[in-house]
Amino acid sequence: MSNLCKILIVDDEYLLRQGIKHLVDWNKEGFEIIGEASNGKEALDFIEKLKPHIIISDIVMPVMDGVDLAKIVKTKYPDIQIVILSGYSDFNYVKDTFKLGVKDYVLKPKLNPEELVLLLKNTASNIPNFIMPTPENSNTLNINNLLSKLISGFYTNFNEKTVEDTFPLESFFLIGDNIKKINNINSMSLLSLRSILSKAAKIYLKDLIYYEVEADSNLFLLIINLKAENYSKVLDQINLMLSEVSKDIPEIFFVLSKLFNSLYELEDVYINNLRPLLGYKFYFKGKNLITYDDLPKNNLKQKFDFKYYADQIYLLNIDNALNYLKEYLCKSITNNNINEFELKTLFENALYNIINILDELNFNMEEMNNSKLEYFQKIDETKSSDELLHLLDIITKEIRLLLNNQESKLNDHMINKIIEYISNHYYEQLSLKQVADIFHFNYYYLSSYFSSHNPEGFSEYLNKIRVQKSVDLLRNEKIPVSEISFMVGYSDHSYFCKVFKKFKNLTPSKFRRNIQDGKRG
């Protein structure tokens, strides 16, 4: 279709670009949509390679707007015609493009298929040495256009016989990659990446029936028509192609959809089967191709317990909190049960929580607070699950080092937490071993630690608290003394009386009588 008038669409609104692409049957009218760009800078990369006859460009765009684009195009490519898209409020900008040689514009709110076709045909008549094809020689089915419409959800009637001739085999699958991510990693242009992959496909898939599908400007996507029994053989060819391409593009990573049997399934397979797989590159370091068969079957999602995590930090069980975070991340990575974005967001939230809670507990977190955004950026930039876990280990070491440098404050907080716990649980059958387990202390170390940070040892302090609580209860004449002993945590009434007498020099009964005599007196 080299005789068609080639059009490049430039607009930062994806839906508008899609709307123009599917507004009319462009091939029937003698035109071919050869590409789309989201801003002027991106468009310039396409122009040299694709050599459009006409550019349909928005006027207001980020990075490079339509005025600056027109200025460059009219200087470097004077034969290329430009049609400006504008809103009612953009007319001052449109007038600036007229000074540069732009001859026509279209108001977005009045975008009309018939008027746009007529305007473009008039515009095409200004192209030097170009003759628009007649409808008779441009009315054949454009398979690329059909596939683009189907994958975008624009269902259309098409010649079944022509489709059967084009795709004679019973099965299809989609295969592709997000080349925008590769572009961000190694700074190759999208056009260069697409060109390398297109050339590789022509070499290694030359005996297959395949077409490039235009679904998203950031994706390189192929549809392959095959016999189901040849699936393994086709995969071998694709693996060979990727092995060669990876020499130039080490980050190349293709995902492969399930097999399907009708072009009418194209949109569903693309949205619900292929696109979700693109997020799994993070979990498959060193692998160039994955399918759903590569994903673990047991991928039940277990929720991260932020309350438990925060409680452990408040109790200053920092190792316990960080180990819980690492175990959760490792399990999620093993099961691939949350996507890359969710995994990184969870890590960032967990880091945010530990910094804020320790800050709230009056630890000096200034250094980590200042580095918080840097940490988040590093998390976002990790390219694999291995890198993410390595970063967690680095941050964990930094947190532990920071707390080790504030050991006296950590000890003060810890003894306060233990005392607070005893005060809240004195009525239980509490033991030193139970408290050691809860606060992740060695039993013998906790005994020494408690005595060194408190006037009494553990047992003495627990008895003191229980006796203080029993004094309040003894003021209530309705509660039997024997019941009070159980209420403050003693299973043996006689032992309670012995302990009480040690602290108060009176038995509980005598203490109550003195209270009553005092009231009567």
Image (tube, rainbow, N blue to C red):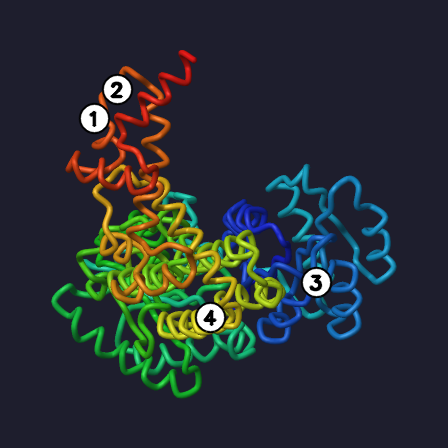
The residues bearing labels 4 and 2 have C-alpha atoms spaced at a distance of 55 Å
> Alpha-carbon neighbours of circle 1 within 10 Å: few (<14), some, or many (≥20)?
few
- Front of the two marks 4 and 2: 2
| Residue at the spot of label 3 | 63
Q: Where in the figure is residue 379, as x and y percent of width and height?
A: 48, 67
**Image quadrant where one finds the C terminus:** top left
Relative side of 173 to 136, left or right: left
Q: Is residue 209 shown above or below 33?
A: below
User: Mark 4 or 2 closer to N-term?
Assistant: 4
Q: Tell me where residue 82 sits by quadrant.
A: bottom right
| Secondary structure at numbered mark 2 | loop
User: Mark 3 or 4 closer to N-term?
Assistant: 3
> Are the residues flagged by discs 3 and 2 in contact, CB closer than 8 Å?
no
The residue at 37%/59% (across/down) is: 317
Relative side of 206 to 376, left or right: left
Give the residue type that dot 4 points to: Ile
> Are the residues flagged by discs 1 and 4 in contact, CB closer than 8 Å?
no
- Front of the two marks 3 and 2: 2
